[in-house]
Amino acid sequence: MRSADFFATHPVFTHDEYLSAHGDRRDRSPRTADSLLTRHAAAGKLLHVRRGLYAAVPAGTTPGAFQVDPFLLATKLAPDAAVAFHAALQFRGKAYSVWHRFAVLTRSHLRSLNFQGSEFVGVRPPRAFDGLPDLGGGVVTEAHAGGTVRVTTFERSLVDVLDAPGSARANLEKIFDQWRQVAAAPGFNGCLVANSASALPPDDPAFADVLRRKLKLMEDAFARALRRAQAAGEVNASLDARATARSLLVIAQGLAVVGRVQRDRTFIRGVVESARRLLD
């Protein structure tokens, strides 16, 4: 593959990807590939992000003026990297604020990167996902900006927020704020699980099992966060963590359905406040 063709289809790429694309040429050794990358970077066709990582500079612009897409960049920071937490919600247009700090879910040791005003930080999957393949699941690959991005699903992103280090009560509050902001957004169209459950055919047990597992994943995350918050004295110590987790799950899924037609902010705020009161 010609370098120009490779750059056109790989806006952000690793050294190994470039070498692999040229591996069918007997005259292309790793040293030759390195020489070509150095030459293209010197010609302003590539931006050297960090060791082994490059971005293709579009024609008509310069490396100094070109802004690399942060989601494409985050995906290439480790072999198993996935955009996660608030960054995943931001990728999906469901974040209530714009951050320039991108969480990268990976089991690899990832050094933090500051690049073009953004910070990229590696985060290991929660312990609940230890031993599970593909960072615990809920990771998809989506086309974006001429390339592809590995990113957690909306449901997995909520689970990751609940399992994030720090105050469990603060994590729960982030979820409540997310409900309020997302449900009131003009383009809100529910969530995949709630929409699928409401349209579930009565004779499809296999699909029902998939939805049950997704709902159980969210229920368990709520329960873990509630127990951590109880241990820290942040919520009522006498509440039943499992029963409250199920109540929060039902509120979340109900809001995802009702919020498709009921956009009144007072209505949504009332639902979210009732969820908050369950913790006290």
Image (cartoon, rainbow, N blue to C red):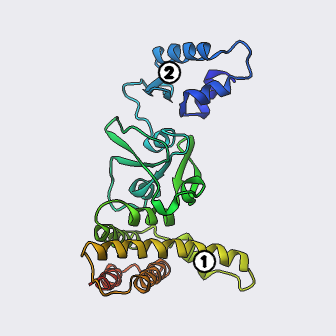
Q: In which quarter of the image is residue 252?
A: bottom left
Report how far apart the C-alphas of labels 2 and 1 lie in the structure: 49 Å
Q: What residue type is labelled 2?
A: Lys
271 or 109: which is nearer to us? 109
Q: Residue at x 66, y 76 (%)?
A: 209
| Mark 1 residue element | helix
Q: Residue at x 45, y 55 (%)?
A: 88
| Vertical placement of residue 71 versus 50, above or below | below
Q: Which residue is drawn at 33% across and 53% down?
A: 98
Q: What residue type is labelled 1?
A: Arg
Instruction: Tell which tag, 2 or 1, sits nearer the viewer.
Output: 1
**Relative to residue 36, is residue 160 drawn left or right?**
left
41 or 134: which is nearer to us? 134
Circle 2 sits on which residue?
45
Q: Dot 1: few (<14), some (14–19), or many (≥20) neighbours within 10 Å?
A: few
Position of the C terminus by quadrant: bottom left
In this orientation, does residue 180 appear? no
Q: Which residue is drawn at 46% across and 70% down?
A: 188
Circle 1 sits on which residue?
212
Position of the N terminus by quadrant: top right
* Farthest-out residue, left: 233
